[in-house]
Image (spheres, grey):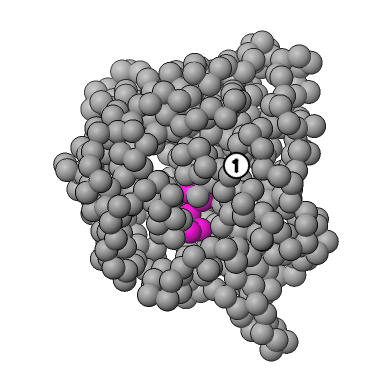
Amino acid sequence: MKNIFIVALIAITLISCSSELDQTPISELGSNNFYSNTGEFESAVNGIYSSLRFYPDNQFYLSEVRSDNMYAVTDSGVRDYEPVNNFQPTLTTNSYVNTVWNTNYAGILRANTVLEKLSETAVPDVTVRTRMEGEARFLRAFFYFDLVRLYGKVPLMDKVYTPTETLNIGRSSVSVVYDFILNDLESAIASLPTTYAMSQKGKATSWAAKALLAEVYLTRSGPTYGIEGPGMNTGEYALALSLMNDIITNGPFGLVSNYASIFAYNNENNMEMIFDIQYSSGGTGVGGSYPSISVTEGYLRAKKVGFPNGEDRKNVSTNLLNTYTNADIRDDFSILLKYTDENNNVISAPSFVKYLNLSFAGQDRFDWSLNYPVIRYTDILMMKAEAILMGGVGSQQDVDNAVNLVRKRAGLADISGVNIDKLLEEKRLEFAGESKRWYDLVRTGKVIDVMNAWIPGEDIVKRMNTMQANYVIYPVPANQMTVKTGLYEQNPGYN
């Protein structure tokens, strides 16, 4: 069902703010007595979800483009995704780096507002009130996890602050931010239901909170790279495994038998989805743009769902294409190799089309109704294998079994003796175009070696810099650095 974002349109208008740290509109809302009954709080909670609307786009540009799955370089070099692709140290003014920071803090502000205003008087039903608190805490943890993976240390806004108060809040250590995330997720697990009525499908469940917490433990357990990034070398693989085994054993999830049907517009909220972002197209104003952003502009124009927008090239890397075998069914579904343009020329431009179905086009290329899978059951299977290989309790057979379940659906034969490098390859093929690869490489300590081995063979125009530890995270946006002199210290390696 799509009602989360549709209802959230009310909340977006009411809760919008001029900047991510500007609390003034919230004070005005309080004085206008908006948060006075259950219906208004439902709108406000849905407004938190609305901050996820461009999450898939942001992940594509800062995660997928950053990885060895893509080579996104144009002849003119003017696109904002190119410095991300090329490991440029001049990303402080990059639009994507700035947008992700702002969007996450907008969501945090909305979550903090709900948590501050929520009361027995406004929402008398204790079950409903508890669920709303769980949703707000889950989403706040979600936003902070995104921030800490991308920027390392970030300001910790644990409540609604005035604009003046925010000028004294510096960046908290990664450890402190993680503790806050863990506390929110533990609370969310205890507060959220395991399922919802169809009218509320898409809301976070306790299973979603467990899955996110498992990924948080995996990420914290990764190497530090000598920087203040997402890895803390905590070795919490047993904690991650406990949560994932619970989901696998007791959750209502499983593998969809046909790979393409996972992403089918007429098969949303299927058994593979543990948490997905809901969209609705056709004039509702809440369609997603992510299905088409991974495709070259010329293809969209040829299919009458695009418009002239200058040079655009976001190609799937040759290396990834060559990693698929002939028997694997996933590349044919996920990747478009070439197309015929408006002038009947055949253009070779390998692009991810996993989420694109032209039969379901909305009003324009920014209006698609397909829900975005943030965490699916296959994630849990593969992360379980990863946790075992990285030091958790489990057998080689457990690892091989998880991988072979996924390979079987892809039309591939069983394998044995899967090590971490083979697992990463299997995950790469399964989740191509889903913005997982970069985080997988970072989390397992492979990102520097893999990227630097990949760059010489892929970078045909010689624009990419050498991958270094500082580039595991992004810089604090320039406009945040100037909010107050000396409030933030910039991440090393950026200028």
Q: Position of residue 53 (x, y in %)?
A: 52, 47
Relative image position of residue 206 (x, y in whole percent): 27, 35
Give the residue drawn at x 61%, y 49%: 451
**Quick check: 363 above or below 269?**
below
* Residue drawn at the location 56% of the way across and 57% of the way down: 69
Q: In this rendering, would 314 be left or right of 144?
A: right
Q: Residues within 10 Å of mark 1 (few under 14, many from 20)?
A: some
The residue that appears at 49% across and 16% down in the rendered structure is 176
Magenta stretch contains residue 217 = no
Occupied quadrant, residue 319: bottom right
Quick check: 231 above or below 488? below
- Rendered image quadrant of residue 195: top left
Q: Quadrant of the N terminus?
A: bottom left
Q: Quadrant of the C terminus?
A: top right
The residue lying furthest to the right in this view is 76
Judged from the image, the secondary structure of the residue bearing numbered disc 1 is helix
Q: Residue furthest left?
A: 250
Q: Is residue 264 left or right of residue 164?
A: left
Q: Name the magenta segment's main secondary structure.
A: loop
Residues 349 and 294: in front is 349
> In the image, 218: left or right of 32?
left
Q: Measured along the vertical axis of the image, is residue 368 above or below residue 491?
A: below
Which residue is disc 1 drawn over? 448
- Amino acid carrying mark 1 in the image: Ile
- Start-end of magenta stretch: 432-436
The tally of labels here is 1
Quarter of the figure with residue 406? bottom left
> Where does residue 147 sit, x and y in percent of width and height?
55, 32
Query: Residue at the spot x=70%, y=18% of the render?
Result: 488
